[in-house]
Image (spheres, rainbow, N blue to C red):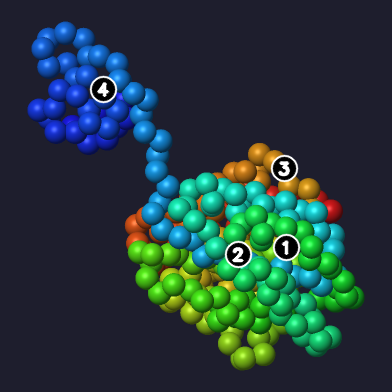
Amino acid sequence: MNCPSCKSQVDASAAVCPTCGWKFNTGGGQPGPSLVRPAARPKIQCEVELGITVDRTGSSEPFQVGIPLTFETIVRQVAAKARSVRCWVASHGDLDEGQAFVIHTDGGAPEQAIEDIKRVTYDGGGDAPENHLDAVESLLNTVPWTASPARARGAILAFLTADSKSARSGISARDLGAEIKRRGILLYLVCEPTPTLQDLVRAAEGLMFQITNSPDPAELQRIAAQLAASIVATVASGGTVPMTVPPLTSRPMDKRK
């Protein structure tokens, strides 16, 4: 049976809940109150490995306030649920203009990642499309993901604007998404929805959210909670397939510049 106080499973013959101290009605009287407060829900006993890439070209300049704010809200939600979180923060630019993929945080704590994203500078002409597929592929192959989902779970979070150029490796958006799924990595895009990025997120069975520079606080919390919940649910179950939803949430964030 379940304890009416803390909802934990208890032997039917028990007189007192071993978790919270609730006195069961075993003698015909009224059940007694808990002796102690119910224990707080424990964090999942697993580490989350979070790889982040930010488009630092001029295309992202209109979102330079919203990107760090959105990331901070998301990573704090995840950190509140996981035993620990390690972050790899990268930024990417236009490879044709010599703007290489750069790692800013190498396996650091969420607080370090939050500060490093705030220091990303946005420049360049902002001519679309951008090298998003190259950046996601680089992140997938750079982060030292833990092989066992029982020990850690990996997730890629990408802040992108405009559409993507073809990957220089020749891999298609669909094949890259399928590879992300095959490796058991979760994929979340905060972006402007484009055909290429939609192919990527569909193949990875990931989540896509509209990028904005002035996110509504309530909507941002909802999105962060949904993302954190999907990571935690997958880690806790030990599964290898992300939670599947349509390419865009039913109530996407408005794009406000």
Please name which of the two marks, 3 or 1, marks the residue nearer to the observer: 1
Residue 192 in view of the camera: no
Counting from the top left corner in percent of width and height, residue 117 is at 73, 62
What is the CA distance from the residue labelled 4 to the residue labelled 1? 47 Å
Q: Residue 26's image quarter?
A: top left
Q: Which residue is mark 1?
A: 116
Instruction: Name which residue lies at 83% across and 67% down.
Output: 121
What is the CA distance from the residue labelled 3 to the residue labelled 1? 23 Å
Q: Which residue is mark 3?
A: 216
What is the CA distance from the residue labelled 1 to the residue labelled 2? 10 Å
User: Which is nearer the N-term, disc 1 or disc 2?
Assistant: 2
Amino acid type indicated by mark 3: Asp
**Can you tell which mark lies on residue 22?**
4
Amino acid type indicated by mark 4: Trp
| Residue closest to the eye, 226 or 109 | 109
Relative vertical location of residue 43 with respect to residue 11 in this rendering, above or below: below
Amino acid type indicated by mark 2: Gly
Counting from the top left corner in percent of width and height, residue 184 is at 43, 71
Instruction: Name which residue lies at 61% across and 52% down.
Output: 74
Counting from the top left corner in percent of width and height, residue 241 is at 41, 66
User: Which is nearer the N-term, disc 3 or disc 2?
Assistant: 2
User: Which is nearer the N-term, disc 4 or disc 2?
Assistant: 4
| Residue closest to the eye, 193 or 142 | 142
Looking at the rendered structure, the secondary structure element under dot 4 is loop
What is the CA distance from the residue labelled 4 to the residue labelled 3? 42 Å
Q: Which residue is mark 2?
A: 108
User: Which is nearer the N-term, disc 4 or disc 1?
Assistant: 4
User: Would residue 57 be found to the left or right of residue 78 on screen?
Assistant: right
Q: Are marks 1 and 2 in contact (CB under 8 Å)?
A: yes
